[in-house]
Image (tube, rainbow, N blue to C red):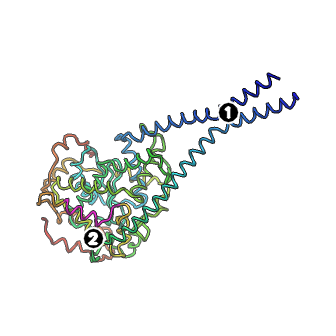
Amino acid sequence: MDKIKLFFAIVLFLSAGVLPASAQIGDIFNGINKGRDIHNATQEWTPEQEEAVGRASAAKMIHVFGLYQNSAMTNYVNLVGDTVAQFGTRPMQYHFAILDTEMVNAFAMPGGYVFITRGALANISNESELAGVLAHEVAHVDGRHLERIIRDKKLTGIAVQTGAEVGASQAGGIAGFAAGMVDQYAAQAITSALTQNYGPDKERDADKAGTDFAAKAGYDPAGLRNFLAMLQQAASDPKYKQATGMLNGKTHPPLKDRVAKLTELSATYPAGGQVLEKRYLQNVNFEAVSAAASTTTTTTTDKKSKKKSSSDK
Amino acid sequence: MQRSTRMSAGLLALILGATCWAAPYFQENKNDNSDQQKQSDKNKNKNSDKDKNNKKKDDNSPFGSGKVNMLHSSHTGDSASAGFNGLTPNGEVESKKLKEPLNADDYNKAQQVSFLGVKNSSLKRFIQDGKLNTAPARSATAAPKKG
């Protein structure tokens, strides 16, 4: 009988002890995993990792908006982009490309992949405006803004699978990234850039740094300001909602605030920066492209042809 | 008596085994629940932020009179509606497009973009033609240009 009592005592003791003990073991494993995640999330991506995420993000951007393939215009955009990118703080190769949509916008992906839309190019008036827009995007890449958003999400444990599928992954196995992570990060980059708030601080930082890069390159520092002021006016008209919708307060701070801040900022730089209207209109001419593509094309009113007569600064 | 004791002991051993087996799952569920709670709290915050943003947007209506005539980069009448690739009429990204799987063409085009860049000599000429500035210190550490 004593043996039976002893047996029950042991069983009760064990059952009381095992549950918390197993929970503690689980906690230890969770802690190890969390520690590893925190370590990964606080580490800056290597150039190889950045390039891999950037290229996967670029593929997604191209899928959604299409790639505008005009080698002369793309080369010109790369020349302007590289001129301002010289003044970035990180030595890296940038790739500037044109998205095939009328939407007026530009996007920066990790790894130096910068996209500007056909719609933006059609409504930019001169090279200083293009330089300002591209410099703003270069500043996002230079400051690792998207990368930080993704790493912060991972750090706080709120990284959300956005429904953007992993897809037929060609990436993966990049040093330090588990297979499939490149696509997951790319999906997060796209979602952050297209549908979520970048964060007003990062936009303001990019406005400031971008204006600085453009001014140092010798452009009129008011280029970005002037382009955004035009958009601010256009955004008040419902007929331009589709073209300007994404820029009007959802992924960026209100245009009014940005224009006001940029007006103040650009006034702090010495006057005399290049505007280069003529060179811009010589290189970005959709009417000419359209005419070359098809002789049967019916052209609509294009103010750019009128602007051609105006001279460079 | 002995039989009932054996049965009790067996039952207790069964409970003990089940407890050991279920413990990690309880732990996992607990984590999941707290994650879900955090997520739903975050969504609530997001929604209230969205409301605030919308109100703010209304308050900050652009001062312009909307006299700007935006230009289209496509010139064919029949392609006008197709010009806004990837966008809803409200100017938001088409969620359907975002969810679509990528195809080989997308990856190939992304690869083409990865080769985009300009030669140092072309950049130098471009900068000179525009009376722009070169960054001397930057050119010494710059990544090699392709092409």
Q: Tell me the chain of label 2.
A: A
The main secondary structure of the magenta stretch is helix
Is residue A54 in sight in this rendering?
A: no
Give the amino acid type for the residue marked by disc 1 in the picture. Ala
Characterize the local packing of mark 2: few (<14), some (14-19) or many (20 or more) Cα atoms within 10 angstroms.
many
Earlier sequence position, callout 1 versus callout 2: 1
Which residue is at 56% across, 44% downward? Answer: B31
Is residue B58 shown above or below A216? below
- State how far apart marks 1 and 2 are (Cα): 81 Å
Can residue A262 be found in the magenta stretch?
Answer: yes
Q: Chain of mark 1?
A: A
Where is residue A307 drawn, in percent x and y?
19, 72
Residue A86 versus residue A247 in the image, above or below: above
Tell whether A123 sits left or right of A196. left
Residue A192, position in %: x, y?
41, 55
Which residues fall within the magenta stretch? Answer: A252-265
Image location (x, y in percent) of residue B115: 32, 49
State the residue position of label 1. A16
Q: What's the residue at 33%, 76% (across, down)?
A: A237
Q: Is residue B128 visible?
A: yes
Label tally:
2
Q: Find disc 2 in the rendering and name its residue.
A: A287
Viewer-closest of B116 and A109: A109
Q: Amino acid at mark 2?
A: Glu
Depth check: B37 or A78 in front?
B37
Q: Quadrant of the C terminus of chain A?
A: bottom left
Category of crowding for the residue at label 1, using alpha-carbon neighbours closer than 10 angstroms: few (below 14), some (14–19), many (at least 20): few
Q: Residue at x 20, y 74 (%)?
A: A306
Disc 1 is placed on an element classified as helix
